[in-house]
Amino acid sequence: MDNDIDSMIQTMIQKQIFALAFSADETLLAAGNFEKIRLFGSQKKTHFKEVTKVYGTALVFSPDETMLVVGLVSGGIQLLDITTGDKLTTLDGHTAPIVKLLFSPDRKTLVSTGYDGTILVWDWEEAIKGLKR
């Protein structure tokens, strides 16, 4: 009986939306849970529809809106190409799920916090250096 209840709870948790983010121009909305990330929005703007097997807990669009920045259950921060959904790179630093991702007002710094109790500050230009976009 306990296994049945645990299974039902796990299924409910996996279906819940844990993260939402609007693009700065408000044409895209990203929604994520432990199964997938979906983008909703303008038909005029090319974007991926859904990426699976990305266990996201926090979302934010990159300053130039070419990437979706995804905080992961694993503590990593994954960068996804908005157009294709391809995984560009993963930033490592946290040892527990990401709670929040935020860009500074000047859009040059990404700040992340996780359940590990740490706050990490990322120089955005350094973080994306060398990425093919």
Image (tube, rainbow, N blue to C red):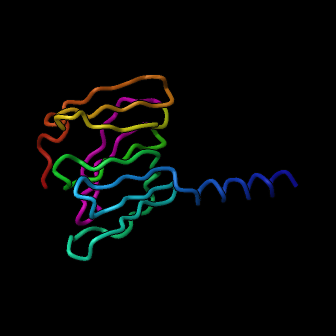
For image coordinates 40% across by 43% down, the residue present is: 71
Q: Is residue 79 magenta?
A: yes
- The span picked out in magenta is 75-95
For image coordinates 28% across by 49% down, the residue present is: 79
The C terminus: image quadrant: bottom left
Residue 85 x/y as whole percent: 29, 62
Where 114 sits versus 118, above or below? below
Figure label count: 0
Q: Residue furthest bottom?
A: 43
For image coordinates 47% across by 46% down, the residue present is: 57
Residue 60 x/y as whole percent: 32, 47
Q: Quadrant of residue 1?
A: bottom right
Horizontal placement of 6 versus 121: left or right?
Answer: right
Where 66 sits versus 70, above or below? below
Q: Residue furthest top?
A: 118
Q: Is residue 83 magenta?
A: yes
Where 116 sits versus 12, above or below? above
Q: Residue furthest right?
A: 1
Residue 44 x/y as whole percent: 20, 75
Where 88 sits versus 36, above or below? above
For image coordinates 26% across by 46% down, the residue present is: 89
Q: Quadrant of residue 26?
A: bottom left
Residue 122 x/y as whole percent: 25, 30
